[in-house]
Image (cartoon, helix red, strand yellow):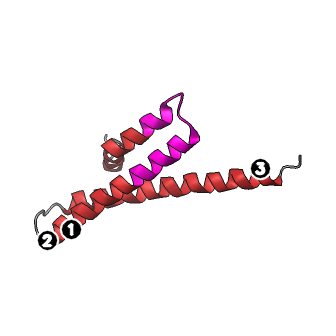
Amino acid sequence: MVNPLQTNLMHLFNSEPVRTAVSKLSEQNSSFADVLTESFKTTNTTDAIDKGSSLELLMGENDDLSGMLIDAQKAELALQLTLQIRNKIIDAYNEVMRMSV
């Protein structure tokens, strides 16, 4: 039996911005700066899509409430991913600063 939650999550991860970010992460020659930049780009893209779908719904141009909610969830997940990457950067920096030479 297919779980509806799994179907929705797969839909979230099959979006173009997320696929682009994952492909960048899987490249062998990508630097950490590239990964961080791609994360920021993905966050900005999903946020713009979310704002656009919300605006369309508010203006009556679109009546797809579920699509707007999915776009909002994608934007939230992308922001959480970016924040976690930032937190890992800060943790790594603090760890390096604690090392004695």
Residue pointed to by mark 3 = 96
Amino acid of disc 1:
Leu
Give me the residue at 89% from left, 46% from top: 101
Label 2 residue SS: helix
Give me the residue at 21% from left, 68% from top: 55
Task: Please state the horizontal and vertical placement of residue 71, each as a whole percent of the image.
Answer: 29, 57
Give whichever of 21, 13 is nearer the camera. Answer: 21
Q: Which residue sits furthest bottom?
A: 58
Relative to 87, 65 lies left or right: left
The image's mark for residue 55 is: 1
Give whichever of 68, 8 is nearer the camera. Answer: 68
User: Considering only order in the chain, which callout, 2 or 3, is on the residue closer to the N terminus?
Assistant: 2
Q: Residues within 10 Å of mark 2 (few under 14, many from 20)?
A: few
Residue pointed to by mark 2 = 59
Alpha carbons under labels 2 and 1: distance apart: 6 Å
Alpha carbons under labels 1 and 3: distance apart: 45 Å
User: Considering only order in the chain, which callout, 3 or 1, is on the residue closer to the N terminus?
Assistant: 1
Let me know if residue 38 is in the magenta part.
yes
Label 1 residue SS: helix
Q: Magenta region's main secondary structure?
A: helix
Alpha carbons under labels 3 and 2: distance apart: 51 Å
Relative to 8, 27 lies left or right: right
Task: Please state the horizontal and vertical placement of residue 6, each as a whole percent of the image.
Answer: 36, 45
> Magenta span covers which residues?
22-43
> Badges 2 and 1: C-beta atoms under 8 Å apart?
yes
Residue 27 seen in this snapshot: yes
Amino acid of disc 2:
Met
Amino acid of disc 3:
Val
